Structure formats: C-alpha cells, structure tokens
Amino acid sequence: MNSRAFRRGAVAVAAFSASAIVLAGCAGSSGGSSSSDPNGEIELTVATFNDFGYTDELFQEYMDENPNVKIVHNKAATSNDARANYFQKLGKTGLADIEAIEVDWLPEVMKYSDLLAPVPADLTDRWLDWKVQAATDPAGNLIGYGTDIGPEGICYRSDLFAAAGLPTDREEVAALFEGDWAKYFEVGQQYTTATGKAFFDSAGGTYQGMINQVEAAYEDPESGEIIATTNPEVKDIYDQVLEASATESAHLGQWSDDWFAGLSNGAFATMLCPGWMLGVISGNAPDVTGWDIANVFPNGGGNWGGSYLTVPANGANVEAAQKLADWLTAPEQQIKAFTAAGTFPSQNEALSDPTLLEATNEYFNNAPVGQILSDRAKAVDVTPFKGEFYFQINDAMQKALTRVEDGTQDAAASWDQWVAEVDALK
Amino acid sequence: MTTTSTPPPATAAPRSPEPGRAPRQPKRVGFGQRLNHWDVKVAPYLYISPFFILFVIIGLFPIAYTAVISFMDWDLIRNSGTFVGFDQYAYVLSNPKFWIALRNTFSIFLLSTVPQMILAVFIAAMLDQNIRAKTFWRMGVLVPYVMAPVAVALIFSNMFGDQYGIVNTTLANFGIPPVPWHSDAFASHVAIATMVNFRWTGYNTLILLAAMQAIPRDYYEAAAIDGASKLRQFFAITVPSLRPTLIFVIVTSTIGGLQIFDEPRMYDQYGTGGADSQWLTITLWLYNIGWGEFNFGRAAALAWILFLIILVIGIINLFVTRGLVRDEGTRGAVSKRQQRAAARAARRALTETPAAGKAGQR
C-alpha cells in the first residue's frame, strides 16, 4: 500500500516535470511593455560596446530632464560580441531601443537599412559630410546617429627619432612628413638606414591607412560589382606598401602579442594613429615617455573607425528612442563623451568646441590632441565606398600582406592567391 | 483468449463468505490493477522522458533545421531563404580552404590525440602504483583541465609569440634559431596540439586510472609469482584489460579533436586561422562562414559535412581500436581461432561477476 502510493506519486511527479519542461520551452517570450502615451512611463535600453563615454551621470542628466524615461545601459565587452548579437536579433525581437554599431560592420547593416528607423531629415546636416554619407542608404535615408570618428595623425617615438638624427619637435615632424605616401616611406628609408631598425609596425596597418583614402577600392558604388582585383589603385597601393615594408616594417601584425610588446620596446618608430589609438598606446606602453603625435597625414586626411547609434524600427518606443539618440549625439554630449573616454566627436559644432580644442594628452608629451585631431578630421575629404563584400575582400587582403610579411609567399604569389579568393566570393 | 481459466467457480460469487469485500472488489482492484499496470508500463518512460524531450527540442530540432538550411541561400536576418539544392555543398567541397582545413584538423588531431593517449596510459599506470599521497597526485593531473580553454589558449599563444615569445627566447639562449610559430603550418599545429595536450591529458588519465583500479589485483599477484616484470605485467594485463575504456576514451577524444575550436581561434589576434590558413580548422572555418560572413547556408552545409566526417572516422576508429587493443594481449603463436576463443573467454570473465569469473577460469 505504502509503496504503491509512492509509485503513484512518482508517476505524477514525472508527468508534471515532463510537461513543465515542455511548457517552459514554449513560454518565455512576451511582448515588451508598449505604451503609446508619449508622457507615460517608459524604459529605454541603450546597447553599446567597449567604451562610448556614456557615463551614468550622462544618462541621469537625461532622466532628470525627462522624468518619464528610465534608461538601462547594456554594455558588450567587444564590438564582435555586439555584432553577433545585433545580427542575431535584427528583424526579430530582442534588440535594445538604441543599438550602437561600428563602421567596421556598417556595410552589412546597410543591407538591412529598411529595418531601422531613419534619422529625421532636419538633423542630417549636424554631422561631418562623410560621416553622414557612409550611413545613408540608396533611398536617401540616414540610418545612424554618428557618435565618434577616427581621424588619423602620425604617432612617433621622439626618442628614436632623435637617435636617428631626425627632428623630434612635433611641428617639425609634421613638416617632415608633409606630402604623399612616397614621402612617408622616404623618411622611413632615412630612419632605417640611420638605425638599422624598423620604421613602421606592419604592412597591414599602413595599407589600411592608404586604402581608406580610395573612393571606390573594391566595389563599384553604382552596380556593387567587385572590381578589387582589376583596380589599378589597389594594385599600386599593394606594391608600394610591400616594397617599403621589405626594409621598413617591423612585420608585427596589429593586435598580435608581439605588436603589443613592440609598442613599448621600440621595435618600430611610427604608426598611423586614429584618435582612439592614443589610448591603446598609452595603455600598453605605460613606461615609455617618447611617444608623440604629429599633426599630419600622408595624402591629406584619413579616417579609421568610429561608430553610430541605430534605432531598430520594430522597437516598442521608437520615437522616444530617436529623441534620446538625438540627444546623445548632440555636440554637448559628444564633448562629454570625449572627456570621459576620448571618443572623438563627429558633430560639426563639437569640432570647434573649446573644451575639445584645448584638450591635451599628458602621455604624448602634452600634445594638443584635441586641436590636432580636429584638424585631421577636417582634412578628410574622401568617403570610401564599402559595399557588401568589403570586409571579406579587405580581410583577404590583410592576410595576403601578412603572407608576404612573414615570408610564407612572395608578393606576386600572394597577390594571385588573393585574386583567387576574391573571385571565389562572387 | 482461449485460455481463460476461471480459478474461482462462477457459482461461488453470489454467495461469497465475505460480504464486505466481494461487492467492492471488481471496482477497486480493477482500477488499482490498471494503475499498477500503467505504472509499470509508462512510468519508466516518464522517468527518462525529460532528457528526450529536451533532446528533441534543443538537439534534434536544430540538427534537422541545419539540414534544411544547408540546401538554401539563407538570410538570417530576414529569416528567409531560397532553395539552391546541393550548391552550398558543392561550394564547400570545391573550395581549397576546405581541404586545407581538413588537413589541419587531422594534423592537429593526430598531434594531440596520439601523444595524449600514450602519455595518459603511462601516467595512469604510474598513479596506479602504491605511492605516497596518492590523492594529491591524482588530483594534480586534473588541475590543467579545470582551467578555462580560452585562458590556456591565451597563455600559450603568448608563449608561442614569433619574436618576443618565451619559447623562442628560450630557444635563442641555446643558440637554436626561432621557430616561426605563426607562419609555418606544422609549427602552428604543434603549438596548438600542445595546448590541447596540456588540458586533456590529465582528464583522460583519470578515466584510465579508474579503469585500472577495476582490474582484479589477483592477476598482478599471479603474474608476479610467475616472475613477470612490471613492464610485462603492464602490457600483458593492464593494457588488454583497459580495452573498453580505451575505446571510449579514444572515440570521445576523436570527436573532440575533430571539433577543435577554442585553441586555434585564440591562437592569434584575428581568430581566422592564419594568413595562409595555416591553422584553419573545420569548425573555425564554419564559425567564420557563419558569424563572419553571415552565410548560414554554407555554414550549415559545412556542419553536415563535418558531422559525416566525424561519423566515418568514429566508426573506423572503433574497428581499428578494437583490433589493435585485442592484439596487444596475445602471444603471437596462437591461431586466429584460438585468439577469438580466448577473447570470448576473457570477455565473459570480465562481464560476469568476479566470483563467477573465477569459477569459470578453473
């Protein structure tokens, strides 16, 4: 009797647990709290990655101005995490009301521009032209609120320059590099001859600076057709950078362990330097006192990196989210973000803000980085077209350069392999 | 229903001597019996059902869905695709990267599994001896396994730096030229296999050790009295007795080895398998196609190809291991038939209870 009762109970428990598991699988997705009342209580989620400079105080400021809004900030560790999350959920549910994206994956986002709420037309002239252009889809909709940009200068080790008999003052160095890439490599040759050491970090990093100045490097902006392998400009840059890298490169692939070591041990003397790179250098070579930045860039200006805020069109509070994104990317807030995390503003007005222009960087020998980067941003005059296949082609190119740098292949063989890889993409 | 024997005569029912029990009997016992019947029949299935229900939801469904997607040009974001037949499979199989990835996967797999197994068996044999502080040593071998694979990969890839890595620096001190860990394919495989071996040798050692502990000590005593050396005992008793466990360990590490991902992914800063695909493995390429290029049709096709490869290798593995390990225990001068008979006897002895096994031996 006793054991039978026990068994009955066990059957019931088993049946219950089985059905509970099934039910748990089905439940779990319920719509967010959507309130159509503009003054009703709403919760806005903002998803960013790395460090956008959006502090709790900044959000608190907005919440004080808009008492009905509660902001929740989700921060992904890396942009790769954010990217995977973004594309998993885009077009479905689960994205934050405001999602940050990086220019690295902007071309992929542009394919789905119809799933994002466009920036109101009256706001579009606030940003730098090329910042707006890059995020404008063929229908003329701007889909991202520009946050930061990566205007490039040249970082150099003044102590190593002195040892090679080159000028060390940043004004003189800027004058020294004034010109095109040939000029840059010429100075490199001088340095290498004098010291026998490498001048720049890697062919890949330098190539990136060069290719970002080409209007349509890999794809035809009109038809989207892949032109990379037949584009003489690409081949020319490839040849030029590899010729120089044979003697001037430290062959340290960017972001490799050896490269980080090279930042502090003087393995190379210069590097192309977007604003956000300053933090990378000072963070990884804290004991080096020689790093400095010159207000110059070969061939004029160049941009490397930067981000946007996007508002998914199927969110629960699109309008409120747009309002917040607008506020976050307004000049005042961009300056606050710059102060907090060094993210360089993309707003026209912010570029002439005194706080920005007077900003200096102690690590870089008190260089007036605000003024320098502001000048560099204004010098950018080309918006490189990046289509659907940009990343795969560029990634394959970076590998082609690495193959030559580490001696696996010669320049011609590596080029041929790259061509074959690009052809396979079509 | 021809055998319906009726134990109590039908006539006995109306005038039953126990009036209290008889009227209630048909109802109560009938339901109780039925319940009892269900209990016996259904309950076991209910007990095991949570796993299978979960497996269908989170295991079987994705596998089937992957098969569907592999025949499509799939757009993850719009959740739609166009049917393209075997195009994705054709693309994968005709891409030179696939064959390079296959080569790398097998190279890393062999470089990690073979030394790992040999090492694990020997370490387990050492730990099986009567040594001081047994538990300390036994737990010690498991310590690397506790470390997160990503942490292991980070530390090791730092050590295997091309120019400033500790390994090359040490080699330089002995006047040995630096090894190009990130440009030479074989060198990169060795480096990655080292990470795998570091982490998994101890784990396999413990499993094998557990199996060794189950070998009756009488065998060793008898062998020792017969004058067999420790080495002879190891090859004649330990290794043959480990057969089922070895098969299990080898098959699981084959599956793990063919799916190697963390270590090659963390081996350099990009995680895409090297400039010349030197250490691109199948799963790494699968990940890059899926989450780098967002081409889920191709990734799904590759996943299925990988599944089939593992299946085939697993089966081959099973047969080879069986053959090899069986041969280890024989003396050579016996015929195949005798070998088989001996093996059958040994199997019986192992599967039966120890007492029965002993009785059978005599």
Image: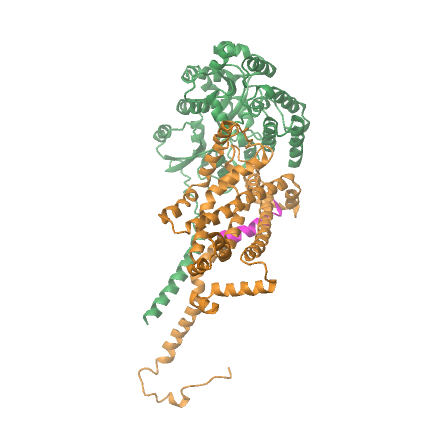
- Magenta segment, which residues? B58-73
Q: Quadrant of residue B217?
A: bottom left
The chain drawn green is chain what?
Answer: A
Please count the marks in the image. Answer: 0
Judge by depth and name the residue closer to the eye, A340 or A73. Answer: A340
> Measuring 65% from the left and 27% from the top, which residue is drawn there?
A410
Judge by depth and name the residue closer to the eye, A82 or A251. Answer: A251
Residue A113: x and y, percent?
55, 34
Residue A83: x and y, percent?
50, 36
Above or below residue B1? Residue B71 is above
> Measuring 42% from the left and 49% from the top, which residue is drawn there?
B127
State the colouring used for the structure image: by chain
Does any portion of residue A307 appear in the rendered image? Answer: no
Question: Chain B takes which shade in the image?
Answer: orange
Above or below residue B145? Residue A246 is above
> Main structural element of the magenta stretch: helix, strand or loop?
helix
Above or below residue A231? Residue B314 is below
Does any portion of residue B141 appear in the rendered image? Answer: yes
> Measuring 69% from the left and 27% from the top, which residue is drawn there?
A230
Q: Quadrant of residue A63?
A: top left
Judge by depth and name the residue closer to the eye, A62 or A214. Answer: A214
Q: Is residue A216 magenta?
A: no
Residue A380: x and y, percent?
55, 19
Q: Is residue B70 magenta?
A: yes
Residue B145: x and y, percent?
43, 44
> Measuring 46% from the left and 43% from the top, which residue is drawn there?
B199
- Horizontal relation, residue A421 to residue A13: left or right: right
